């Protein structure tokens, strides 16, 4: 999965510091990340004109191994030609994987910082808290922590069969090629177990039982924290009733006939693959 970057170690403890040689740097422009055109990767210290010029304003993001990652708020003059703008989707396939994980995680953090420049309660400009990763409003004291949306991925099984879905083209243009599992966001006031039962009922009209938590995954492409569950169909009737504005297809597959393909960076893929190899 995208967060599995061993032997590298992701350290997200909030210990802001100044950039130094060996660190990596992101710029953002028009909703895109600017990578180094020369390498297709986040800029290195050596690629930036720090020695000869002033360092732009920066925000410390996190550390992987000894490498600090920073968002630099403005592109130094003369660097436009050296920059390659990419959309988040590019990080699904960027290599090496640990820099792909760093890049999408940085993008989510940047989006959060940008969305919280002003206090949602009183409208004053916020500033970074000195101790925690949070934006503090100096006018009213409002403290805003990074926004993460909890969501579930659900593999509904019935003996040796697994229910796969495809998004409706109306709902997700361009994302209907691969089979997926049932997925949905937790609502306020709702335990994840209830999210699982509700989403399965809403999307395919089936009751489930024996929920089994598998693994979780930070999915920064959509700002989610995914929790993967297996569960059993609580009925002998496999008839699927599709929520048609959400799904275009819901199909039961025998274990031996599960389709190949999909993205190995995703929890969905790992859960389908795990079921393919035996009971879970
Ligand atoms: Zn405020």
Image (spheres, rainbow, N blue to C red):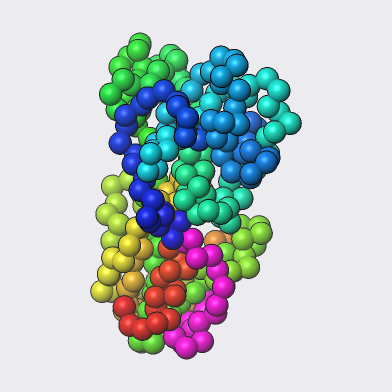
Q: Is residue 244 left or right of residue 238?
A: right
Could you tell me residue 188's position as x and y percent? 33, 45
Viewer-proximal residue among 32 and 181: 32
Q: Is residue 15 left or right of residue 114?
A: left
| Residue appearing at x 50%, y 30% in the figure | 71
Count of residue discs: 0
Q: Is any atom of residue 148 visible in this view?
A: no
| Residue appearing at x 34%, y 41% in the figure | 11
Quadrant in the picture for the N terminus:
bottom left
Could you tell me residue 90's position as x and y percent? 61, 50
Quadrant in the picture for the C terminus:
bottom left
| Residue appearing at x 28%, y 70% in the figure | 211
Residue furthest right in the image: 81
Can you say whether 173 is above or below 214 in the image?
above
Could you tell me residue 237's position as x and y percent? 40, 85
Q: Which residues are magenta?
A: 250-266
Viewer-proximal residue among 143 and 251: 143
Can you say whether 275 is above or below 2 in the image?
below
Q: Is any atom of residue 223 visible in this view?
A: yes
Could you tell me residue 195's position as x and y percent? 34, 58
Q: Is residue 265 magenta?
A: yes
Can you say whether 267 is above or below 25 in the image?
below
Viewer-proximal residue among 177 and 88: 88
Q: Is residue 167 magenta?
A: no
| Residue appearing at x 49%, y 74% in the figure | 164
Viewer-proximal residue among 235 and 260: 260
Quarter of the image holding residue 248?
Answer: bottom right
Residue furthest top in the image: 139
């Amino acid at each position: 999965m995208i967060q599995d970057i061993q032997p590298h170690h992701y350290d997200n403890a909030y210990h802001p510091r100044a950039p130094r040689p060996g660190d990596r740097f992101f710029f953002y422009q028009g909703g895109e990340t600017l990578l180094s055109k020369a390498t297709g990767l986040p800029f290195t210290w050596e690629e930036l004109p720090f020695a000869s010029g002033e360092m732009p304003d920066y925000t410390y993001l996190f550390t992987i191994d000894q490498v600090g990652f920073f968002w630099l708020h403005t592109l130094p003059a003369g660097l436009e030609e050296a920059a390659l703008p990419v959309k988040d989707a590019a990080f699904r396939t960027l290599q090496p994987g640990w820099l792909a994980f760093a890049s999408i995680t940085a993008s989510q953090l940047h989006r959060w910082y940008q969305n919280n420049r002003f206090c949602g309660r009183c409208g004053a400009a916020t500033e970074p808290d000195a101790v925690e990763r949070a934006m503090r409003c100096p006018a009213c004291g409002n403290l805003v922590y990074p926004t993460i949306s909890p969501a579930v991925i659900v593999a509904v099984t019935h003996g040796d069969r697994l229910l796969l879905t495809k998004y409706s083209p109306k709902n997700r243009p361009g994302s209907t090629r691969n089979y997926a599992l049932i997925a949905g966001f937790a609502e306020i006031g709702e335990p994840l177990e209830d999210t699982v039962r509700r989403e399965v009922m809403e999307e395919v009209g089936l009751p489930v039982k024996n929920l089994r938590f598998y693994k979780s995954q930070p999915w920064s492409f959509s700002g989610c924290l995914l929790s993967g569950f297996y569960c059993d169909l609580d009925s002998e009737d496999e008839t699927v009733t599709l929520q048609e504005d959400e799904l275009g297809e819901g199909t039961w597959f025998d274990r031996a006939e599960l389709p190949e393909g999909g993205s190995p960076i995703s929890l969905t893929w790992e859960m389908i693959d795990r079921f393919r190899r035996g009971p879970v």
